[in-house]
Image (tube, helix red, strand yellow):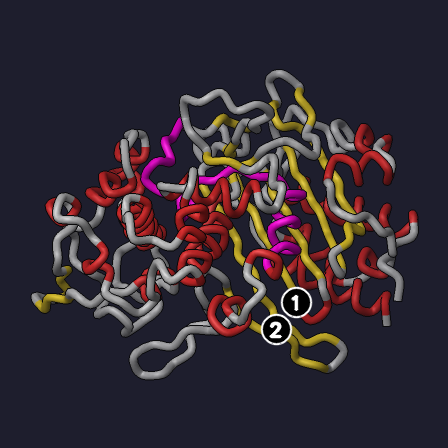
Amino acid sequence: MALACIVGSGLAWYLLKDSIHPNINSTITAQEGFDHQHVMGDEQQQHSMNIPSQSTLSQEQKKQLDLIFQSFKETVSSPGMQVAISQNGSLIYQQCFGFSNVEQRVLVNDTTKFRIASISKPISTVALALMIEKGLVDLDRPIFEYLSEESKKKIPSELVYKEEKFNTITLRQLASHMSGVRDYKDVEKEFMSWSKNYPSIIDACEMFIRDELVAKPGDKYSYSTYGYTLMSAVMEEVLKAQSENPLLPLETKIFLQNAKDFKSFCKKHIFDALEMNNTTFDEKNKIIYNRSSFYMRDTGDNAYELLNVPSVDNSYKWAGGGMLSTCQDLIKFANGLQKLLPGPLIDQTLWISQKTNEGLPTQYGIGFVVKSIQLNGKEEKLVYHTGGACGCCSILYMVPSRGISIAMIVNILHAKRMVELCEEVTRQLVLKKE
């Protein structure tokens, strides 16, 4: 079955049924900022991506995908969008749509850096897994045992839930959202904190660390970006302490060279290792070339008018949502996981649904949503993560058994149905092949 059938199926309908009137007060036409990308041939795509390009789609199928993703962009009313798809390690589709900066009429290209929001989480847990592999941390050791005496002045040794104190929270619980550390509660109240710059990750923990837990550690899944802030603070504590350890083996010393804090560790061992040349941290005041602008739609009297999002400082959530990237780099990340972690850590740790204290599966592993998808009557593992933050929505979607990876990013707040779109495209890729 060709990909053309997607347009005639229910997919086009569900892309449109939740439309938020994208053309009202919009300064962008449907076609503007789209046709320019068709001049990019396969050779240019391969050079810019540095990913093997082996087209298994006909030109007609690629055009159908263009129409599908353009329809999605219009439905969610986003100024700009990137998409990339790979199969068995080879790029089979990539496209850019619309504007990275509406006011300056700057078009999205394949190196435009978007906020990826919570896709930062799987990247951060891969960094954690690299530290586990080197024996620097243990997933199930209480995090307070890793803190220096100085840091213990900022991080209490016990956290509280309904007057009961806990000092056994682990990295596993933080990474799997079962620590009980709260997430955002009052957005309007906390926005001022989001504009504050924190000199260190441990300092950023002041936002939440003395608040009551939302559950006993391990009792239930409760999504928390702040949990990732605490996780990365512990990682950074270990990196700093171990880099000064004179008894470390030479191999570990080399491993930690130029990687003595969380951000430099991610850069050396993930971004640089996988040639993710357009991935970095979204530092507010830093000059970052080709960084997209970010947008939202007015929900007040001027409903649907396109607006710039307020300025935010992401230093409170580097690990949980503070990275910039491109779809091409996210595909490099997806395809490079086995290179970074050739052992059992991916399949047996990161991609395994964690369980509560009562043994209930959460459908979330260590930094990845872990579910299943029915493909031709067979249930197969599905791993992905979505992201949504100030002026962006994103998804990295993988079906490992089929070698399929899909990345999508838009520069608008509140874009829905990315998971459903990726699922339908995956089904058509499998049907096309079989």
Q: Which of the 4 quarters of the picture holds residue 94?
A: top right
Label located before the other in sequence (1 or 2): 2
Residue located at (74% from left, 33% from top) = 30
Classify 354 as above or below 67.
below
Spatial distance from mark 1 to mark 2, Cα to Cα? 7 Å
Tell me residue 261's x, y (percent): 36, 41
User: What kind of element bears circle 2?
Assistant: strand
Q: Which span is picked out in magenta? A: 311-337
Q: Nearer the viewer, residue 394 or 139?
A: 139
Q: Nearer the viewer, mark 1 or mark 2?
A: 1
Does the magenta portion include 320? yes
**Residue tagged 2:** 381
Residue located at (26% from left, 63% from top) = 180
Q: Which mark is residue 26?
A: none
Q: Nearer the viewer, residue 290 or 131?
A: 131
Q: Which mark is residue 400?
A: 1
C-beta proximity under 8 Å, tags 1 and 2: yes
Whether residue 229 can be seen here = no
Tell me residue 376's x, y (percent): 76, 78
Classify 256 as above or below 290.
below
User: What kind of element bears circle 1?
Assistant: helix
